[in-house]
Image (cartoon, rainbow, N blue to C red):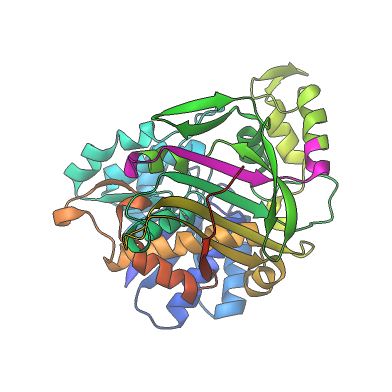
Amino acid sequence: MSTILVIGAGGVSSVAVHKMAQVSAAGSGIFGEIHLASRTKSKCDSIAASVKERTGVDIATYEIDAEEVPAMVNLLRRVEPSLVVNLALPYQDLPIMDACLEAGVNYLDTANYEPKDEAKFEYKWQWAYHDRFREAGITALLGSGFDPGVTSVFTMWLKKHKLKTIRQLDILDCNGGDHGQAFATNFNPEINIREVTAPARHWEDGEFVETPAMAHKVEFDFDEVGRKNMYMMYHEELESLARFVPELERARFWMTFGDEYIKHLTVLQNVGMTGIEPIRYQGKDIVPLQFLAAVLPKPESLGETTKGKTNIGVIATGEALDGSGEKTFYINNICSHEAAFEETGNQAVSYTTGVPAMIGSALVASGKWSAPNGEGGVFNIEEFDPDPFMDMLNEHGLPWNVRELDSPVKF
């Protein structure tokens, strides 16, 4: 059994730790000791208490600033985990990877690195660690959330079982839930708003094409949710999919937003509250977006009031594996906010990211996913066999469905 150290104490972390504890309680032999650390130990203690009540499993908790590499190394040497599961902020990816390198511990995350001073996220910084992880004989698994994560695995499963090549790919992320708030984000407000307000980018004819944020809107009828407006955005799995599915002619990412969200965000942006440059206020430097995030409802507090479902998936068009010509397939998962809260005390957006984080951890910890020839390195989730991951999605609360469409998408 493996010792696991989870970093971060938000909604995603809560789900992941609850699911790890469920697997441990079931006697699978994958997870042994589960440890949880964050900047605020009281949040870890609250998660640990919920896990104990729901599963009977004990979780050890710690206070840590994940950006302090020496402190992280000391914690790793104290706990001696086989895997660090980074569910903190994307700014902290590189310091945690540095600590894992120094302590010789495997690493996993759900979102790629993003510098604090620039609303830009890409894999280049983490891909640059590959040789050092390989030489250290340890593995880093990047992007084991839902998007990135499950959507990437969906794509590779289609390529393994349905399509010889993928010419066109669209990732559709719909949150049809209603949390009852005038304005709130379903995951970390700072990261959410940085993503939404950044320029959109999509892959076309061998390069990324940039367009203004929220400039492209289409309506789509989502199963069990209904018709929703979705907007083209940039998301990091476009970068990794363009690398690992080199025949892609076009790849796009779409996310749904309600009119009220767009209205509030537009006003906040117009008055400067989404800015990431520090301003001087009463003798102190503050970042407007960080202040805004502090006053908005915490995503982990929305679980009890959120009703409805998420529907996230991919639509892929390409040459059929069986030689029958061009085909289009739609593969997706539908998740209930109410069911997610009943099981883990968290809403479905956290659930759909936390469950894949647990699954990726289980596959790395059990050795089902490992570097070629037993060496280490930095790998995206697309580089591993999708089948065991897809099986575990069905087993652990995120069942998926695939169907053939009559034609490629028209939007």
Q: Height in image: 143 above or below 208? A: below
> Which percent across, then down, holds residue 392?
43, 71
Q: Quadrant of residue 97?
A: top left
Q: Which range is magenta?
A: 243-262
Q: Is residue 250 magenta?
A: yes
Q: Relative to 303, is 107 on the left or the right?
A: left
Instruction: Specify whether residue 112 is in view.
Output: no
Of 128 and 21, nearer the camera is: 128
Of 317 and 239, nearer the camera is: 317
Residue lying furthest bottom: 27
Which image quadrant: the N terminus?
bottom left
Q: Is residue 9 magenta?
A: no
> Which percent across, then down, holds residue 251?
48, 40
Residue lying furthest front: 324
Q: Residue at x 62, y 38 (%)?
A: 232
Q: Height in image: 59 above or below 120? A: below
Q: Residue at x 41, y 30 (%)?
A: 205
Of 171 and 80, nearer the camera is: 171
Q: Height in image: 376 above or below 366? A: above
Q: Relative to 202, is 311 on the left or the right?
A: right
Q: Residue at x 66, y 20 (%)?
A: 278
> Which percent across, then down, holds residue 344?
62, 70
> Which percent across, then down, holds residue 161?
35, 64
Of 168 and 276, nearer the camera is: 168
Q: Quadrant of residue 47?
A: bottom right
